[in-house]
Image (cartoon, rainbow, N blue to C red):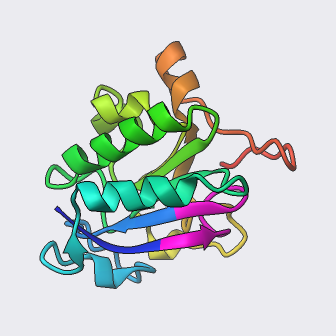
Amino acid sequence: MRYNKIRKMDISNGPGVRVSIFMQGCAFKCFNCFNPETHDFNGGKEFNDDTINKVLELCEKDYIVGLSILGGEPLHPLNIEGTTKLAKLFKAKFPNKTLWVWSGFLFDRDLKDKEVMKYIDVLVDGQYKDELHDFLLKWRGSENQRVIDVQESLKKNKVVLYINEEDSRICV
């Protein structure tokens, strides 16, 4: 497994100041993807325990409210094991910080039974569709993508959309 980059202070991918890691490799290759350099599974750098330790160390800062995992495709079969390990260790160390993940896979069709879902607070699911792109959407690129409260969805066994507490608008 490989990753493309780590951002120490990201304010674009989830609420507040976050650490973000962009996993390498994506089979979807959505047209006009904002991160095409992450598509090649052989690109980027090796993802290993040192990478995980670096991410966790960056998350220790008081002003960091959470971790965002994007791609590429962090939940692709070639990446899900490493993503799960990072997610599990992050939530064990920082139970009060949020974990956001972006995936082209759908929660209710592809992901709800995966171990990684136990650790994710918010999932933005669905492939980016350029014809549905809207600059005004919060935390997603196209109207078909959903911002999902994963833990509530697992409890209720149905998709529950995340409500942004800062502005009380549903992120749908």
Give whichever of 88, 170 is nearer the camera.
88
Q: What residue is at 51 percent from the left and 73 percent from the top?
A: 7
In the image, farthest residue toward the top:
156
**x and y, in percent, of residue 90 in the image:** 45, 42
**x and y, in percent, of residue 149 in the image:** 58, 34
**x and y, in percent, of residue 155 in the image:** 52, 15
Direction from residue 67 to residue 77 in the image, left or right = left
Q: Is residue 14 above or below residue 134?
A: above
Q: What residue is at 54 percent from the left and 69 percent from the top?
A: 132
**Quick check: can you spot residue 144?**
no
**x and y, in percent, of residue 97 in the image:** 62, 41
Q: Is residue 141 above or below residue 96?
A: below
Give whichever of 50, 84 is nearer the camera.
50
Q: Quadrant of the N terminus?
A: bottom left
Q: What residue is at 31 percent from the left and 62 percent from the top?
A: 51
Q: What residue is at 24 percent from the left and 79 percent from the top?
A: 44
Q: Is residue 34 above or below residue 109?
A: below
Question: Magenta span has 70?
Answer: no
Direction from residue 169 to residue 52 in the image, left or right = left
Q: Is residue 5 above or below residue 108?
A: below
